[in-house]
Amino acid sequence: MQLAPRPGLSHLAGRPTSTVTTVAASAPASGATGIHRWAPATVAALAVRRAARGRCSRSCRRAEGEQVVTPWEVEAGDDGVDYDKLIETFGCQPITAEQIERIEKLTGKRAHRFLRRGLFFSHRDLDELLNAYEKGEKFYIYTGRGPSSESLHLGHLVPFLFTKWLQEAFDVPLVIELTDDEKFLFKKDLSIDESRRLAWENAKDIIACGFDPAKTFIFRDTDYIQQLYPVTLQIQKRVSMRTAQNTFGFTLSDNIGKVSFAAVQASPAFAIAFPDFLEPGRRCFIPQAIDQDPYFRLCRRVADDLKWPKPACIHSKFLPALQGHQTKMSASVASTALYMTDTEKILGLGGSTEERGGAWKPMARYRKLRKKINKHAFSGGGKTEEEQRANGANLDVDVAYQYLKIWLEDDEDHGGNTSGLPMVIHPHLGDTATPIFTRNHHHPSAISAAIFSQNGCHSGDFCCGKSDRKIAD
Amino acid sequence: MQLAPRPGLSHLAGRPTSTVTTVAASAPASGATGIHRWAPATVAALAVRRAARGRCSRSCRRAEGEQVVTPWEVEAGDDGVDYDKLIETFGCQPITAEQIERIEKLTGKRAHRFLRRGLFFSHRDLDELLNAYEKGEKFYIYTGRGPSSESLHLGHLVPFLFTKWLQEAFDVPLVIELTDDEKFLFKKDLSIDESRRLAWENAKDIIACGFDPAKTFIFRDTDYIQQLYPVTLQIQKRVSMRTAQNTFGFTLSDNIGKVSFAAVQASPAFAIAFPDFLEPGRRCFIPQAIDQDPYFRLCRRVADDLKWPKPACIHSKFLPALQGHQTKMSASVASTALYMTDTEKILGLGGSTEERGGAWKPMARYRKLRKKINKHAFSGGGKTEEEQRANGANLDVDVAYQYLKIWLEDDEDHGGNTSGLPMVIHPHLGDTATPIFTRNHHHPSAISAAIFSQNGCHSGDFCCGKSDRKIAD
């Protein structure tokens, strides 16, 4: 990739970047999403609803069976999130079979299972991006995370694993924003230092997904703000408080940092924010959870005025919380999600693989995971084993099954033969799920501190802040 | 001055700072003020008034004889600004003769004429600052400018010249913020590059005031944001949109950058923003125009919560516009103010002093100034020379006299013998004022590009951004 100074901001180009760390978007509840952040407030739909019938509390809206999807909160109706309605409300487009086929043709690779199985279901300007790519115009990928927890949970991994596939398939550079500033502004008792530390911890989990170090740039906002700031200012100047309020639902009680942060998250969607390794006109592609869409609607809105390319987006559904599909995994409620660190203590007891002479004891690692599943995972079957055997499973709502659908690589395992699988019946789920998690952990791009370390993917490889650090194209 | 890492932000300490430039606060109308900015919106008083009687346009308030003083607008009643009322509304304290005497005793220097003549008239926590100083605790000074014009006018110089005196008298370090970001956010057609350029141009005028390069740090926000950001975030987190709205009068049409900028301007008031050369607990002293007080009320409000020392403030009155004392000099209306550049073209024709073999031709430089005074300066006498001779001058409103009162070093020139001076009668003002401006320009700390260059005070001496750059204590 060539070093390209950005026009009009040449004074900032070529300056050594600062030291790197990580965290991009805070982790709300569930997970099959690109960027998770607690950040600002509500989507336009909510604002419209409020305007139409006055203010209504979350519980009141919930009682009306209304779904609420914002960057900070996901509350579905009894039948789960109505994604068709979301597409309509947000004004994006469903992904078609033809588009998936076209991606396979252009990349020469079978589509990722998250795409084949409809987990990534919606987009903005995907055709425009693919048209340009077909003509030889390369894009870059932008995703991120807000460091709201010590480690990532399964839901958080979905967008990163999908992003890894995109990077490999399209052979393009990737930037990962870790929004330590956002988490600090949105979480009452979080200090900047702690937010920066969490970002760093989360970066390890992210890097373990197996991104190409030569083509990946991970940064904490507090480390990279010097370069982001001119872009952030350009966006801030073009977004009124009215727009921010309508887009995110801010109130007068929100702090002034929250309101302006939207522009910080929007900035990496423009190549001009990375003058050291991206040419200014390069298109951006953003894999993200559908709840993050408000940020990028806003971002696309100002792009025309700034004469910068509008970023294309691809949206995922949410991974439900263990407790059921009305909400999503939450980084702040540990019992709702399966964390990478849920296995860590047990791992620690056994020492590193090297210390154990290369012997690998996978089963020991998943005891905590299995316990959690047994205790918390919502079942689509009956309450007792007898009832479950008699009535079978309701796979549409069975959380264990929803997870399996995502994590099993082989389509046939659950695509054709789903109706009566014993593994989806709670409390037997743990026994069945454990080997699956094990398999996933054994994969070269699996996520665990141990594997991260084994692969030698030291986070320093991904850091910005070294003047001699360049990203390959 | 010792290099002191700031607690909790140690990761940012010791990092090379970025290259410097200048501009602190946009230049509204008049001038005897510390920090001039167009920035946000209105003072608390205005918000209170609005709340009390609904929204009222500026002309409507003006018609009611009500004064309006905000960081962006100064509209006085027919008798000029009522400063006693401002002190009451803003909740600050008048400066007493005892305090001036105490400053003279502590510094061993005669008080600056701006202080002796009541141009600096109000303060916050001045006694606390002097008490600490008396016990050997040194403070630092913070002032600034927003780069809204090509050069500074007479009004802008007042705070800087006073600051120079403070720095010398108390022997303390000084930081000067140039808010290129603010001007970009507040001025519709201003680009970031142009704002940065203006900041740089303004820095030259500021440096020409004669600050001690070894104890002065001048920076543009866009260059120093990496270091400011953690402090700015801390402030942003503690200021609600409601507070910002009440303090500055923002509306939903204002952009989101304006709202959060208040925290950027507040940040340099805390020593923790300068970990490379200030210890975190050092007190700050802010010479400023009274219209900038809302920023620092807000700043003092969050200081307790952050356990950082509350900055002390000293407020100046405004230099009236040439057109009269109901408003102040405006950087955006050239005819209201006397600019340093008003003489530049004529100077250029004559070449530099060196080129002219050391000969100095002061009179040639002030033609443009005199013309401007003759044409625009509001007179306290009659409309014709006859009327003026018959009725004498009304010195309370005569603009020329107001200027003379500030710029004549000798108290006797105008202190005791003011009533019938012919020099205050318009149109004869120009002839009288010219030598005074000349005298000021001859002073070693005078302001002009030529003298700036003669003194060898290259702006680079003041720049941040060099890792080996330290500021002396």
Image (tube, coloured by chain):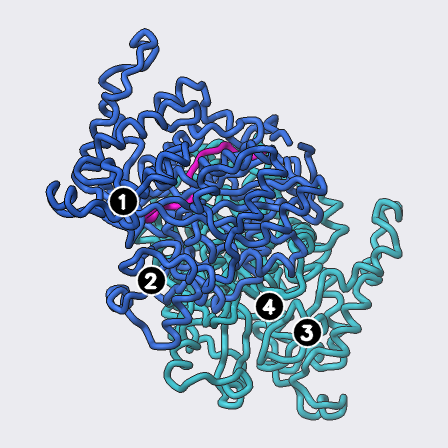
Chain colours: A cyan, B blue
Q: Where is residue B242 in the image (x, y as percent from the top left)?
A: 48, 69
Disc 4 packing (10 Å; few <14; some 14–19; many ≥20): many
Residue pointed to by mark 1: B399
Of the numbered discs 4 and 3, the one sitting upstream in the chain is 4
| Image mark for residue A336 | 3
Q: Residue at x 55, y 49 (%)?
A: B267
List the residue tagged with mark 2.
B67
At label 2, counting other C-alpha atoms closer than 10 Å, the crowd grade (few under 14, some 14-19, many 20 or more) is many
Residue range of the region highlighted in magenta in the rendering: B16-30
Per the image, the residue denoted by label 4 is: A28
- Outermost residue on the top side: it is B357
Q: Residues within 10 Å of mark 3 (few under 14, many from 20)?
A: many
Give, as a three-letter code, the residue at label 3: Thr
| Precedes in sequence: disc 1 or disc 2 | 2
Residue A157 location (% of width, % of height): 62, 60
Q: Mark 1 and mark 4: span between their CA atoms?
A: 62 Å
- At mark 1, the secondary structure is helix
Subunit bearing disc 2: B
A8 horizontally vs B348: left or right = right
Residue B21, magenta (yes or no): yes
| Inter-mark Cα distance, 1 to 2 | 19 Å
